[in-house]
Amino acid sequence: MFKKIRIPVLLCAFMLLGLILWANTPDSLTIHAEEKGNVLKTVEEDTRSLSAYFSVSKIILTLIILALTYLFVKIITGILKIWAERNTRNRVTIKGLIPLAAVIIWVASLTFILVAVFSPPMASLIAFAASVGVAVGFAAQDLLKNVFGGIVIIFDKPFQIGDKIEIGNDYGEVVSIGLRSTRIVTPDDSLVSVPNLEVMNQAVSNANAGEGNCQVVTELFFHPGINIREMKRLCFEAAQVSKHIYLNKPVNVIVLHEKVGSRIMLKVRIKAYVNDIRNEFIFKSELTELLTARFSDEIPLLKIDE
């Protein structure tokens, strides 16, 4: 008897509990309406906050600060360049400060704009930086690689402005190190721009490594019957009496046999240092002229290879 009554009683209890829960639960339309109201309220609040962060006055102030920063960087760069050209001994060192000074000024300016002008909450700043980082990372991968390459070059200093370097087939003096590319002036007075990504991915030969002097190698070919001892003595003298010679470093004359066409020639390499890297080719031309004039009367100079 008890078992027969127990099942209907339990069913009635569950039904009563379901009715109570249904009565206390708000209607689904009411829920959707409340959610919609909350979403609209959130959107309005976000819109107000964005308009507060990116107001017209703040945007105008930001543009003014960026323009002033650009002018200030140009002025500082110009002053450093003039100072470097007037101070020959420290020219390379002074020019090496130009890209570092530009980076510091731009970072300080952008930090000031972010902190003092816009002053966003840290959470919003992190979210914005993450979003921008992902978007820019996909849209400008090569550009970012060049930018990071430029930053590495500025701080690692494999070379600096004023150095004589060789990148691939291009050789010349570094005149600027930007965030996107490095520019060098070749001996033919051509301006070559090399993307920083390519600079980082290949070997770079630096002739002076930040010093004002650099080694110059002058190569000459003589007849093998020449008096080698006399020839070496005259090569030493020609290098040492030059006004462009840097006497704090040694002068070396190396003599080798080398096959030129079908003949065996005497190859002479004169290794000397010039006191200013810009006198490299003047010094090489001077040695070639002096030695050609000296030996042309005795034993013909068959070939000159500069």
Image (spheres, rainbow, N blue to C red):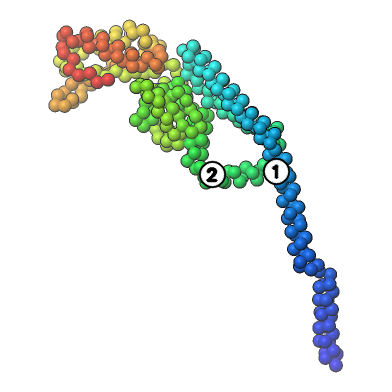
The amino acid on which the numbered mark 2 sits, given as a three-letter code, is Gly
Is residue 288 placed above or below 18 in the rendered structure? above
Residue 50 marker: 1
Q: Whole-percent x and y of residue 64?
A: 64, 28
Point 55% across, 22% down: residue: 74
Position of residue 34 measured from the top left corner of the image (x, y, whole percent) = 77, 60
Mark 2 and mark 1 lie on one chain; the one further toward the N terminus is: 1
In front: label 2 or label 1: 1
| In the displayed structure image, the side of residue 161 where residue 239 appears, left or right | left
The Cα atoms of the two marked residues, 2 and 1, are separated by 24 Å
Q: Residue at the spot x=37%, y=21% of the render?
A: 189
Q: Amino acid at mark 1?
A: Leu
Residue at 71% over, 46% down: 47
Q: Is residue 151 above or below residue 266?
A: below
Q: Secondary structure at mark 2?
A: helix
Query: Residue 269 sits in which quadrant?
Result: top left
